[in-house]
Image: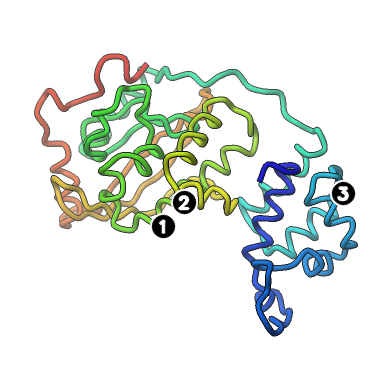
């Protein structure tokens, strides 16, 4: 997959996920050698020549017009984050790259860490733009059993999901959550695809996790917002928690993640148990928050 541009690889991956019948084309007879749509089929749907689309996918054409990008997005049935990513990649292919930002800080403001404590007993934590765990309250830290086995610089929620022994067992619907996590990293690559910390994390996960490597090549894109997660926690049992993700102003991508459950429910009771920890479990070791 090293040939061409990131735009070409994105188009090729998304083309492979569209079946002819999904876009009103006959499936035909016999075995199709190409998964999903053929180049000529997508070119026809987008109203461009096959030669032009082939050059675009192979990285020989790098300046598609906004009209062509819009037509490709419609033909590929993209919307939301995925469509936004297509426009970002088209701009990058044309050399319209944003000014690289400075490296992310691992310092969490005192006011934010105070907020984490006021949110107890609800689990809450702060992550970097690539999901490094920067700070957490007691239940937020205990939400990820075994993560403190790793040194502070390796505590990353995505790394935990794919590489920690407890990662797969913690999530009741691991496959769905893993797909969302990989798609979130794709979204993070939009503004700054060459950010060193992202390249390092993705490189490690591709090598060490076949599941992540497969999901990464799908080029799915999903911005992280909120929703519900179903945990099978080894200490407190099953719990379904809703969560919200909020950007922290004046930081380089830091986000506050909070969880909650309706009062007087088994899920709420399980969540409360996370806050009942011994003092030595109460926080990140020295150096993990800064």
Residue 45 percent across, percent down from the top left: 80, 69
Q: CA distance from mark 2 to mark 3?
A: 30 Å
Disc 3: which residue: 65
Residue 92 percent across, percent down from the top left: 75, 37
Binning the other alpha carbons within 10 Å of mark 3 as few (below 14), some (14 to 19) or many (20 upward) gives few
Q: CA distance from mark 2 to mark 1?
A: 6 Å
How many numbered marks, from 0 up? 3
Q: Are marks 2 and 1 in contact (CB under 8 Å)?
A: yes
Disc 1: which residue: 176
**Does residue 270 appear left or right of residue 61 in this picture?**
left
Query: Residue at 87% of width from left, 65% of height from top?
Result: 47
Does residue 225 show up? no
Does residue 77 show up? yes
Disc 2: which residue: 180
Query: Residue at 31% of width from left, 39% of height from top?
Result: 164
Q: Quadrant of the C terminus?
A: top left
Is 250 situated above or below 240? Answer: above
Colouring chosen for the image of the structure: rainbow
As rendered, which of 65 and 51 lies closer to the eye?
A: 51
């Amino acid at each position: 997959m090293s040939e061409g541009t990131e735009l070409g690889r994105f188009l090729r991956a998304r083309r492979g996920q569209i079946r002819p019948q999904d876009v009103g084309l006959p499936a035909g007879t016999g075995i199709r050698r190409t998964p999903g749509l053929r180049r000529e089929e997508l070119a026809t749907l987008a109203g461009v020549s096959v030669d032009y689309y082939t050059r675009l996918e192979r990285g020989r054409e790098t300046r598609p017009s906004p009209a062509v990008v819009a037509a490709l997005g419609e033909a590929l049935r993209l919307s939301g984050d995925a469509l936004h990513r297509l426009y970002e990649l088209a701009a990058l292919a044309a050399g319209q790259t944003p000014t690289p930002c400075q490296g992310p800080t691992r310092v969490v403001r005192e006011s934010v860490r105070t907020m984490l404590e006021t949110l107890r007993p609800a689990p809450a934590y702060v992550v970097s733009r690539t999901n490094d765990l920067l700070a957490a309250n007691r239940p937020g830290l205990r939400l990820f059993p075994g993560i403190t086995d790793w040194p502070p610089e390796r505590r990353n929620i995505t790394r935990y999901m794919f590489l920690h022994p407890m990662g797969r067992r913690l999530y009741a619907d691991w496959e769905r959550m893993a797909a969302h996590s990989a798609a979130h990293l794709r979204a993070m690559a939009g503004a700054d695809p060459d950010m060193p910390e992202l390249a390092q994390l993705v490189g490690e996960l591709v090598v060490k996790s076949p599941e992540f490597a497969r999901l990464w090549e799908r080029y799915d894109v999903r911005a992280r917002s909120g929703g519900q997660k179903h945990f099978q926690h080894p200490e407190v049992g099953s719990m379904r928690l809703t969560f919200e993700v909020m950007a922290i102003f004046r930081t380089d991508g830091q986000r506050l993640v909070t969880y909650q459950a309706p009062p007087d429910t088994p899920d709420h009771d399980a969540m409360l148990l996370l806050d009942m920890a011994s003092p030595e479990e109460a926080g990140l070791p020295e150096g993990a928050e800064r």
